[in-house]
């Protein structure tokens, strides 16, 4: 579970009664896509012929550019998560990260799912005694990619939802 029981209005668009601007929603989607793409090789090295996770990331970016609809991006995200079902470890987490990035167009709060799954992928790909360190490095890399306009929002979200995101943001 990565979504809170009660939706945070900061992640609901203004037209739906929240406070999230379209421009910040787009920044969240782009950041989530970057987080997922950063670990995508963990999936593609196991399933080089399966384009679904990469397509989800591409759809997230295409949604920001107005080239695909929210429904198309959300569907691509679902297909990426489907690619993860029979996998384990880093490949599975990387596909889920891509799927979460794809569905940010539908629910902005999935941005944290993309980041959390990417951290889990980095941890799982590392040698057993290096997993925590790899997760810390991934979390730091992600935070360095945050656009200033959404930085405080995402960092606060990480603090608030860390417990339901496997405590990957404790860094």
Image (spheres, rainbow, N blue to C red):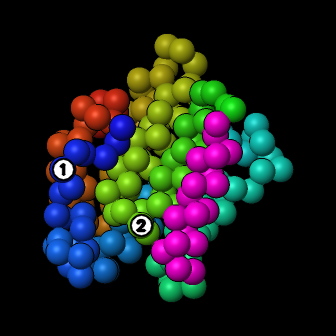
- Residue 36 in view here: no
Task: Give me the residue at 66% from left, 58% from top.
Answer: 54
Task: Give me the residue at 37% from left, 56% from top.
Answer: 111
Where residue 98 appears, as percent x and y from the top left, is 55, 52
- Magenta residues span 68-85
Asked whether 143 or 1 is in front, the reply is 1
Reading the image, the residue beneath label 1 is 6
Task: Give me the residue at 51% from left, 86% from top.
Answer: 66
Q: Quadrant of the N terminus?
A: top left
Mark 1 secondary-structure assignment: loop
Left or right: 55 in relation to 67:
right
Left or right: 35 in relation to 84:
left
Check residue 77 for magenta coloring. Answer: yes
- Residue 136 in view here: yes
Where residue 82 appears, as percent x and y from the top left, is 64, 46
Left or right: 113 in relation to 77:
left
Mark 2 vs 1: CB contact within 8 A: no
Where residue 73 appears, as percent x and y from the top left, is 54, 69
Check residue 100 for magenta coloring. Answer: no
Reading the image, the residue beneath label 2 is 106
Where residue 49 appears, as percent x and y from the top left, is 83, 50
């Amino acid at each position: 579970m990565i979504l809170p029981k009660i939706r945070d209005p900061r992640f609901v668009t203004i037209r739906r009664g929240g406070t999230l601007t379209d421009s910040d929603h787009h920044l969240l989607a782009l950041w989530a896509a970057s987080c997922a793409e950063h670990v995508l090789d963990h999936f593609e090295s196991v399933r080089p012929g399966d384009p679904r996770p990469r397509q989800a990331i591409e759809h997230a970016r295409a949604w920001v550019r107005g080239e695909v609809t929210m429904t198309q991006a959300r569907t691509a995200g679902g297909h990426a998560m489907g690619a993860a079902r029979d996998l384990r470890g880093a490949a599975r987490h990387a596909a889920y990260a891509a799927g979460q990035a794809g569905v940010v167009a539908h629910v902005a709060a999935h941005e944290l799912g993309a980041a959390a799954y990417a951290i889990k992928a980095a941890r799982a790909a590392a040698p057993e005694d290096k997993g925590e360190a790899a997760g810390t490095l991934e979390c730091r890399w992600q935070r360095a990619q945050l656009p200033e306009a959404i930085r405080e929002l995402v960092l606060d979200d990480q603090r608030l939802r860390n417990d339901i995101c496997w405590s990957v943001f404790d860094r």
